[in-house]
Image (spheres, rainbow, N blue to C red):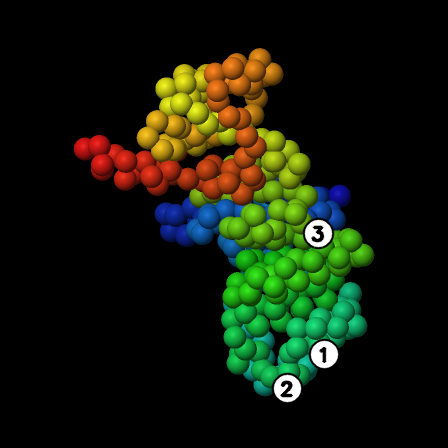
Amino acid sequence: MTVVECTNLTKTYGKMKAIDNLSLTLEREKITGLIGRNGAGKTTLLKMIVGFYLKTTGELKVFDKEPFNSLTVSANSIFVHDEMSFPTTLNLQELLAEASQFYINWDTRLAKKLFDYFSFPPAQYHHNLSKGMKSTFNMIVGLASRCPLTIFDEPTTGMDKAVRSDFYRALLKDYLAYPRTFIISSHHLDEVEHLLEDVLLLDEGKALLHLPMTELKEWAIGVQGDAVLIEEWVKSEDIIHTKSVGSDQRYAVVKNHVTEKDLYRAKLEGLVVSEVSPSDLCVYLTSKHQGGIDDVFRNDESS
């Protein structure tokens, strides 16, 4: 079953296209990573999915409904982000009690156990929490709601490393026990890749890739060696990224459609072929320049 489906979806602000002719589907009971640099359009897309923003053109369906002003979408989704606001007159314990009235699948026991685990003072107020503690409390609300569509937009903002690790483990354990559709937005794929089944890479409002994580891990390869040999070797390849390494070495990332014969030739020529991590690949694909930052300084040095 499809939870989210969009066709030629566009969202504009004046002359700027935040979402540009986007077409995709997100299936039920999967964890999808929405990956992209700051300004790629991730938050805009998520806010349209949950019905906060009205599309400009194209089609968008969530649970087979137009999400804007949809009670069905509102009742079955939650959007967790670092700017969530809660009534300032209610303390944290009271907020959790009220939240149970809004979400039909709310798990009071899970909320209480997570609340105690992270040592929240019951009488504290959300607006007085540190940034990291706000994110942690928001995470508790997101997980305990058990919404069929649960969206976390940059959920670990301000959290320290140990809390981030606990959050991801809690999310995975609860997902395995109560499968539902998760979308996790991040510009740090390396932190969440162990959770993800699908990855949607967004850049300037367009989908560069939408693949299962298993395929993304094999989508590209890296080749390093003598600069002259590398230049020759990649002539007929789809080059994604290239950079200088030392004085006479070069590293190139190419789309992985090379043959066994190509790999054998590379080995004979002394080139080193390696895997490219999904996180690095997403950085390379969304970079405005094929070369690395060292190339900028190398050009200065040689001028």
- The reply to whether dot 1 and dot 3 touch (C-beta < 8 Å) is no
Q: Can residue 209 be seen in this view?
A: yes
Count of number-bearing discs: 3
Which residue lies under the disc numbered 2? 123
Q: Is residue 290 left or right of residue 261?
A: left
Image vertical order of residue 29 relative to residue 285, above or below: below
Image quarter (top left, top right, bottom left or bottom right) of the N terminus: top right
Mark 2 residue crowding within 10 angstroms, few (<14) / some (14–19) / many (20+): few
Label 2 residue SS: loop
- Picture coordinates of residue 102, whole percent (x, y): 71, 71
Q: Which amino acid does label 3 sit on?
A: Thr
- Picture coordinates of residue 115, whole percent (x, y): 69, 74
Which residue lies under the disc numbered 3? 181
Label 1 residue SS: helix
- Picture coordinates of residue 200, whole percent (x, y): 58, 42
Q: Which mark is residue 97?
A: 1
The earlier-in-sequence mark between 2 and 1 is: 1
The earlier-in-sequence mark between 2 and 3 is: 2
- The reply to whether dot 2 and dot 1 touch (C-beta < 8 Å) is no
Image vertical order of residue 133 relative to residue 88, above or below: above
